[in-house]
Image (cartoon, helix red, strand yellow):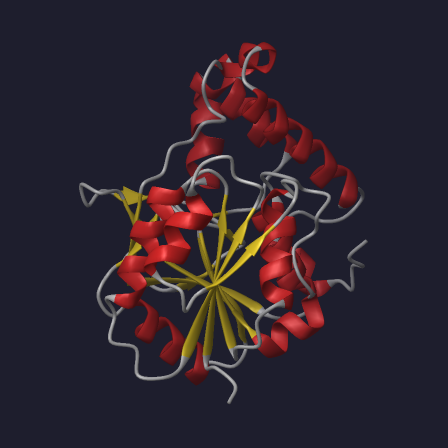
Amino acid sequence: MKNKLSIIIVNYNTGQLTRACVKSIFGQSLPWSFEIVVVDNASSDESVELLQSEWPEIKIISNATNVGLAGGVNIGLKETTGQFRLVLNPDIIVLDGAITTMVNYMEANPPVGIAGGKLLSPNGRLQYSCYEFYRPMTIVYRRTWLGKTKQGRKAVRKFLMKDYDHKVAAEVDWLMGACLMVNEKALEQVGGMDERFFLYFEDVDWCRRFWLRGWKVLYLPAVKFSHYHQRTSEHGGFWGLATNWVMREHIWSAVKYFYKYRNQATGRTAINQHNYVDN
C-alpha cells in the first residue's frame, strides 16, 4: 500500500543529530502510514550502524561517495513514493503536531507545491527561514562592510523579510531547505533538486522552479520545528574565502545560480507573469 508520507533525511557524519531527528518523528502520533529514508553520504562516523541498530525498519541508503545535499535528496525522492515528501535536515527536531498539520494543509490546498514550517532555535527564538529571491548585491551586502551601510541594512532586512509578520501564513519566494514538504503531483512536473548545487542554493533554485511551473511556495508558521542551525558559511566575512571552504562553496553556488537565471527577472511577480525556461 502506498504511503501517505515519505520522510527523507540526508546524513553526513551527523549520526547523533539524525538519531534525535528520527526519534522525534517516531514520537509523533501520525494517523497514516509513512516511511523514513536516510541517505548517507559516505559518512566516516558510525551513523549507519547507529541508526540500523535502533530502527531496523527505516531504510538506509549508503552512498559510496558524498554526492552533496541535492544529490542525496534526489536519491531519497527516487526511493520513495509518498503522496507528500518531507525533506528534513538532520538537525531538525519535529515538534508535536507539526507533520500532521503540514500534511493536512497541503492536502486541503492542492495549488501549494512546496511548503515550509516555522523554524525555532532550541531556546525558542525565531529563525528567519523564508526569503525574497537573491540578487547579486544581496551577496555583496551580506559578505562585506557594505552591509553596514544604510542601503545595505535595508536590502538585507528586505531579503530576510524581517518586516513581515512571521505569525501569518504567506506565499514567499523561497524557503530554507532544512524542512520542506512537497506535493507529489508538483514534484512530477518540477523534478528533484538541481545537482549542480553541491551545497547551498539548491533550495533557492528548487523553490524558484516550483514558481516557474505555476506551483505556490508557502510559509506555514503554525507548523513548528526546532532547528539546531549554524551558518558555517558566514564566518570570516569576504576574507573567509581563503580559509572557509563552506563559504567558498556558498559563493560558487551563488555564481552558478545567477548564471543559470541570467537575463531572467528576479522577483516572484515577474516570474509568474513570464514563461521563463528552467535550464
Give residue 238's quadrant in the image: top right
Residue in the foreground of this view, choosing between 222 and 233? 233
Closest to the observer, 46 or 91: 46
Residue drawn 63% across and 70% down? 187
Q: Residue 249: x, y in percent? A: 62, 28
Residue at left 59%, top 15%?
241
Give the image quarter of residue 148: top left
Name the foreground residue: 222 vs 173: 222
Q: Position of residue 12 (x, y in %)?
A: 50, 41
Please, is residue 163 above or below residue 170 in the view? above
Q: Residue at x 33, y 51 (%)?
A: 19
Is 134 situated above or below 203?
Answer: above
| Residue at the outermost bottom position | 1
The answer to whether residue 32 of the structure is visible from this angle is yes
| Along the viewing direction, whichever of 125 and 248 lies nearer the viewer | 248
Q: Residue 5, image x and y in percent?
A: 45, 75
Q: Is residue 213 left or right of residue 106?
A: right
Where is residue 170? Give x, y as percent. 41, 63
Count of numbered marks: 0
Image quadrant of residue 247? top right
- Is residue 182 positioned above or below 131 on the image? below
Q: Tell whether 149 sits left or right of 274.
A: left
Residue 222 visible: no
